[in-house]
Image: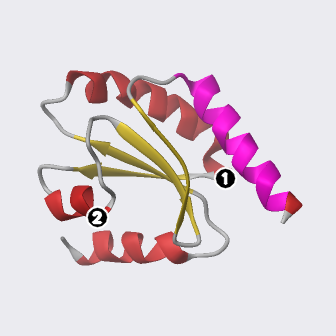
Amino acid sequence: MNDAEVEQLKELYDPEKLFLLDFSAEWCGPCQTMIPVLDHLKKRIQEKLNIVTIDVDRYPQAAMVFKIMSLPTFILYKKGEELWRRGGLLTVREFEEAISRVKSEEIKE
């Protein structure tokens, strides 16, 4: 892991930032299918969300820590806490709905 990647992981504990962790692998067909979906999502709501892609072959320890059992797996994460988790193929709309639910729950607190 290089210094930039370490700094990016440290940001996961930033209280102001919402992260979408994307656990994937180069050999994973569904993971490759999700790349344009995530690119589109990033363009639509980039100010609200930081997307971090974690290659489980390069970082198997991260997959173990986050208990990743299938690919792709997506986790919304804020303040060092998992707020939402889904696996498989998702649409931009499904991601947006999950982000909205997470944000509305934050407002209630």
Q: Residue at x 75, y 52 (%)?
A: 103
Q: Is residue 6 left or right of residue 85?
A: left
* Image quadrant assignment for residue 34: top left
Residue 65 is marked as: 2
Magenta residue check for 94? yes
Q: Position of residue 73 (x, y in %)?
A: 37, 40
Q: Where is residue 44 in the image (x, y as percent from the top left)?
A: 64, 35
Q: Which amino acid does label 2 sit on?
A: Val
Determine whether 36 is above or below 95 in the image: above
Residue linked to disc 1:
47
Q: Which of marks 2 and 1 is nearer the N terminus?
A: 1
Q: Which residue is drawn at 12% across and 49% down?
A: 57
Indicate the quadrant containing the N terminus: top left, top right, bottom left or bottom right: bottom left
Determine whether 44 is above or below 30 in the image: below
Assign the magenta stretch its main secondary structure: helix
* Image quadrant assignment for residue 99: top right
Q: Position of residue 40 (x, y in %)?
A: 53, 29
Q: Residue at x 57, y 26 (%)?
A: 92
